[in-house]
Amino acid sequence: VGAAVLPLMAARARAVDPFGDKLTHDLLVGLGATGALGSLLLIALAEPLTRVVGGPELAGASHSLTLLAPTGVVLLVAIPLGTTYLALGRGRRYLHFNALALLFNVVANAAFTLPFGIDAAARITWATELAVAAAASLPLWRRDSGARHTALGLTGLLALVVAGSELAAAGADPRIVAGAGALVILALTGGRLRCMLGALRRPSAQGVGALEVAAGEEQIDG
């Protein structure tokens, strides 16, 4: 989904200011919701997945995989924001964000992974990508209320998945946690997901045209 949507976002960014564009905001939230659903699916399947891959003796690794699961939603927030920067010719700034995240990763691993082990490494992995996403999202927070609403929505998706990951790792039933989280996400972001999928259903329409058709349908549905 990300590979299909990112070129459409880049085309849109060449036509309008993406940080002030409602359609781009819808796609950002749609991608973030897709990543969140994928992360929740990983939480639900972590235990059987590790058993299939490594056998019963590797079943304990599901705990670490559950803690790593938020990486999915963080990546599908950070990468689309990075695509926006590249489309605007601000790739150098996005590179600076990644350099700062690399520094954070090295320091955090030295401070926490060495004494506390793999669970700390799992959390630091998604936290590193979160550092990139947080820095790249600053223009959204500085814009109008619509852009700030989008930034808040992305923050909410991240917080929901991280909370689900920690609850499941602490012993809550991962299937219940993942199912409840998925219902909340679908209820809150269903319209944005329909907008994104509407653009993807039109292979004959290119770039901005496909997005505008999907946005028009979403406006009518609303």
Image (cartoon, rainbow, N blue to C red):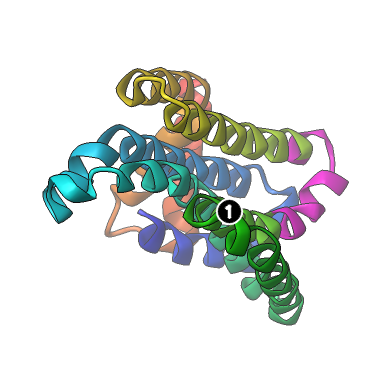
In the image, residue 16 above or below residue 23: below
- Residue at label 1? 116
**Residue 6 drawn at (x, y percent):** 47, 62
Would residue 129 be visible to someone looking at this image? no
Figure label count: 1
Crowding at dot 1, Cα within 10 Å, few <14 / some 14-19 / many 20+, comes out as few
Residue 91 location, quadrant: bottom right
Q: Residue at x 33, y 50 (%)?
A: 200
Q: Kindly identify the amino acid type of the residue bearing the numbered disc 1.
A: Phe
- Is residue 137 within the magenta segment? yes
Closer-to-camera residue (189/219): 189
Closer-to-camera residue (84/138): 138
Residue 80 location, quadrant: bottom right
Q: Residue at x 78, y 38 (%)?
A: 148
- Residue span colored magenta: 134-147
Would residue 202 be visible to someone looking at this image? yes
Residue 39 location, quadrant: top left
Q: Residue at x 44, y 23 (%)?
A: 181
**Residue 73 drawn at (x, y percent):** 49, 46
